[in-house]
Amino acid sequence: MISEYICKEVALRLELPLKGVKATIELLDEGATVPFISRYRKERTGSFDEVAVRSVESMLKTVRELVARKEFVEEAIRESGGMTPDIARRLSEASSLTEVEDIYAPFKPKKRTRATIAREKGLEALAKIIMAGRCDNLEVSAHRFVGKNGVENADDALEGVSDIIAEWASESTRLRNITRNSYTRSASITCVVAKGKEKELAESPFAGYGEFSQTVRRMPSHQYLALRRAEKEGLVKVKYTLGDSSDSLDDALCRAFVPKQAGKECSGLICRAVEDASKRLLRPSVENEVSAKLKEEADRVAIEIFAGNLRQLLLASPLKGKRVLAIDPGYRTGCKVVALDSQGNLLDEGVIFPVPPRSDIDGARSTLDRLIKRHRLEVVALGNGTASRETEKFVKESGLLSPDKVYVVSENGASVYSASELARKEFPDKDVTVRGAVSIGRRLIDPLAELVKIDPKSIGVGQYQHDVDQTELKNALDYTVMSCVNSVGIDVNTASEKLLSYVSGIGPALASNIVAYRAANGDFHSRKELKKVPRLGDKAFELAAGFLRVPDGKEPLDNTGIHPESYGVVESMARSLGAKVADLPANESLLSKIDAGKMAAAGIGGLETIKDIVAELRKPGRDPRVDGDNEAFVAGVGSFDELREGMTLPGIVNNITAFGAFVDLGIKENGLIHISKMSRKRINSVGEVLRLGQRIEVTVIDVDPIRHRISLSLLENDKRD
């Protein structure tokens, strides 16, 4: 039974209809995946799209964690005997973990502190007397406790009392909120160069953080992550400052905590205790909170950018039907070359040495000529690593294939794949250089199918990925891969085990079983045959079937995104048109006669399902990635030394960060377009203007020959695809 409170809380926080949220939570709890719910359960959720369903899944986790913590804290306070109607009300109304922890603070089991020692001396009674304003003379009151429980003198007693009051102040929700508000409004983060690290900092990527200062309110996420990295590496020391607000904070804390009935003498002691609490307990605690919030927000932004980049990379347009010559370039050890058929199967291999130190141009040309003719190779996939530009020049000048058939492909992560267990299973008798070249070629043929084999963090399209929360990063990237795989649809007869593992409802174990069944029995001829796979039960079939394709099978609908549960709806459509099911796919004259509203009203199926079926039948088995640009990139310059300020050059966006976009100009060094140089209008994110893989024209505005940095701008020309 789903808690009504949880459903309402999720709906309220996301501003989504309660009915749809409740249905989504029910489906998630039943084991349904986000792609399945958003694609095949629209009637039940009220047409929630994938973003909405994913938001519900994420918020559900947050709310359930909050509820669980509330229950724990409530039980702990009750067991301590401290529960009151007011605390129960505050706990019930708490909407964040921070509020819950503030309520719990006075009741938490405590370590042995200065206040603990003072209590052991029996001084809590005196502290309560002072806070209640029932003390006219501190010295006289303190003397009553001297000689008891180790209290040496009146000063010792009053010092202990001060420690107890300081702890009470640090546990006060009101004082914690005052301190938080002060830091939120007025605090700055500043850093200075660590002693003896001046030279090292100047030569590092963090040179600009030597005298850095920024308010907490305006701290950019990427700068905060960079600052933390610089601090972690021991290059700078970071601290929070309140400036002129520091004294006013302590004044506000004293006013809020000193009882009105307290006399002058007692007020002075309480104020000193509050100032001690502020310096020793409140500020460090709140600074930790602020740091955690800044880190959480910086992580969120970085992970969103990484996931967005990864999605664009995975959904890059495939180069289908082409036989590929793949080259992994290198200097001393030569360039590894492999021939692949249009499915990415390895046909042949070799090594050429067209660049220094050997520069065997004739031998390299002869080897490539032989491979191209023997295997009817049509395009070249060239890795963008070491010796890439020199090798590209050789290939284009060789005349073996047209220069516009030479594609430069990112090598990021190829070495990770080539040394992986997966690569060893695919090519047990080949070395890592052959595996790497095959991976480069397959990335051109089908980026999604090849890149899913690599840990997303190794693909190199994020910022500070090693500094963010690794669990959250993994969850986001794994979800992104799953989302992309299911949005495209997978050929069950050619998909690798890794690719199959990302299909809704499948996972690694079932993926392995599918591949083993395929190896033993040959290709699948229908989706129904999947039920013969060991351990692939009805639930897994329900979640997976719509995303798996069976080309040239017995059932034409098996090569579409139409779920088997809706085949009856398609049959009803065909009957109403006096046609056969096989006549419907891509038959616009028939499909245009279908009235989805009438069919839904007649109870044939849900309106959204019928609309989706018609849309799918219009373009059956269509790959959503085929609309991309598949032309090879031709660089405008050949080397860094050719760059001049004011040049207009073609480029391809190859990484997007919070602060800008990196652009491949066809040379070794990437250029950077800072976010301020992207649009004359104010933009909040790079993604509003640019996307990964986009072809653009840029203007060179600065060239740094010392650090080999290139600054670019889009403002001088606005020719974006």
Image: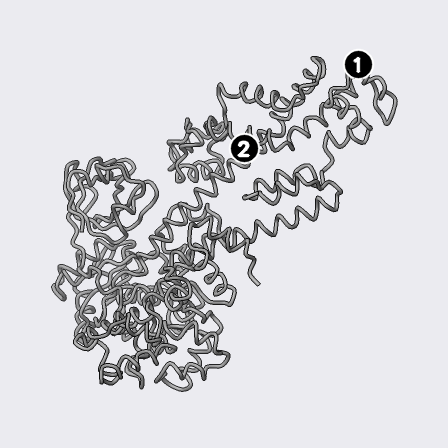
Q: Amino acid at mark 2?
A: Glu
Picture quadrant of residue 323 = bottom left
Report the mark closest to the observer, 2 or 1: 1
What label does residue 184 carry, if any? Answer: none
Which residue occupies 67% across, 47% down? Answer: 74
Q: Which residue is mark 1?
A: 139
Which residue occupies 46% across, 28% down? Answer: 185
| Residue 262 horizontal side relative to residue 426, left or right | right
Q: How far across and how far down the image is residue 602, in percent?
A: 32, 76
Query: At numbered mark 1, what does the secondary structure look like: helix, strand or loop?
Result: helix
Q: How far across and how far down the image is residue 684, in percent?
A: 31, 40
Query: At numbered mark 2, what does the secondary structure look like: helix, strand or loop?
Result: helix
- Above or below 102: residue 448: below
Query: How dense is the environment of label 1, judged by Cα within 10 Å: few (below 14), some, or many (20 and up)?
Result: some
Q: Which residue is mark 2?
A: 287
Quadrant where the N terminus lies? bottom right
Q: Amino acid at mark 1?
A: Glu
Mark nearer the N terminus (2 vs 1): 1
Tell me, yes or no, if residue 57 can be seen here.
yes
